[in-house]
Amino acid sequence: MTQWEGKAKGTPLGYKIFIFFIKNLGLNAAYSILVFVAAYYVLFSFSTTKAIYYFYNERLKQSSFRSVISIYKNYFIFGQTLIDRTAISFGLKNKFSFTYDGKEKIQNLLDKKEGGIVFSGHIGSFNIARYFFDEFDMTDTGVNLIVTDQENEQIKEYVGAVSSDTTMKFIVIKEDMSHIFEMNEVLAKGEVIVFAADRYVEGIQFIEEEFLGKSVKFPSGPYKLAARKKKPVLYMYIMKGSSKSYNLYAREPEFSESSVKPSHVLKEYIRNTEMMVEKYPTQWFNYYDYWEDLKT
């Protein structure tokens, strides 16, 4: 089974269908097609279903029957997050409710104007962070979302052409490593960067640490950057609640920035992420051999 290759799940046709339903029939109609789409993926998307079955059955120790139910719910909720992100980009943010657990921690980070690093991941709806941050006072502090080149192209192709303005900026990870200079520059200016720091890509440097009972490779770059720059760190998760609601969680680390090491940052990330997995098990959206434990 293949590694993650830097491309988010979703197709141009799928987005076009969602857009048609949202614009012409409304959000609930768009959700209704997910009944069939989720079933299709369970039955016919063998590699992703195999990977997510392993997550529920082996890592979360669910029974085979419960694992299959969780897979269906997972695909359904993931489809909802894609629809919601598209709807919000059309200017329909008022159709949703947003709650915050730790909002003051993010605002304090922005108010310090010292720069900072926010760690997130692909549990929940990291991709709508750009709209959540519009609720904060960012008058004097820029916020930069770190994305892969493939993810950036999807943002432009599927959402960017019709999206409402957002104050968040993007730094694209490039092969020539120029993104490192951009990150150093914005941190030096006192701005904040936001990472989804849970996916390792073959060929890059990594740190191994136990996650949900088994060793996983994590990209070392974000964690080394946090340790080297000694900037304030937060862990943030945006989770879909019931109906059309989203919940943001922001957590501070249990270490001092002055003595931090990359392993400290990663272990805190794992601790907080495992708590989110326990609370929202059907919002784990890594559809590949995450633990490198499946046969090809």
Image: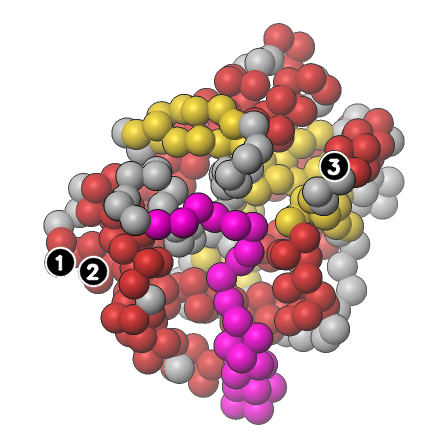
Residue 206 point in image, percent of width and height: 52, 27
Return the residue at label 2: 68
| Residue 139 lies in quadrant | top right
Task: Please name the residue shown 51% across and 17% down the image.
Answer: 264
* Vertical arrangement, residue 102 with respect to residue 125, above or below: above
Residue 267, visible in the rendered structure: yes
Q: Say which element carries label 2.
A: helix
Question: Which residue is disc 3 drawn over?
Answer: 177
Image position of 9 (left or right of 233): left
Viewer-closest of 96 and 278: 278
Q: Are marks 1 and 2 in contact (CB under 8 Å)?
A: yes
* Magenta stretch contains residue 68: no
| Magenta extent | 1-27
How many circles with numbers are drawn on the protein? 3
> Does 258 sit above or below residue 36?
above
Which of label 2 and label 3 is nearer to you?
A: 3
The amino acid at mark 2 is Val
Going by the numbered disc 3, the residue's amino acid type is Met
Upstream in the sequence, badge 2 or badge 3? 2
| 149, 2: nearer the viewer | 2
State the image coordinates of residue 225 (x, y, percent, origin top left).
67, 24
For disc 1, the neighbor class at 10 Å (few under 14, some 14 to 19, many from 20) is few
Residue type at mark 1?
A: Phe
Identify the image's colour scheme: rainbow, by chain, secondary structure or one colour: secondary structure
Q: Which residue is mark 1?
A: 65
Label 2 Cα crowd, 10 Å radius (few <14 / some 14-19 / many 20+): some
Rendered location of residue 296, percent (x, y): 30, 49
Decide which of 158, 133 is in the foreground and name it.
Answer: 158
* Front residue (pair 296, 15): 296
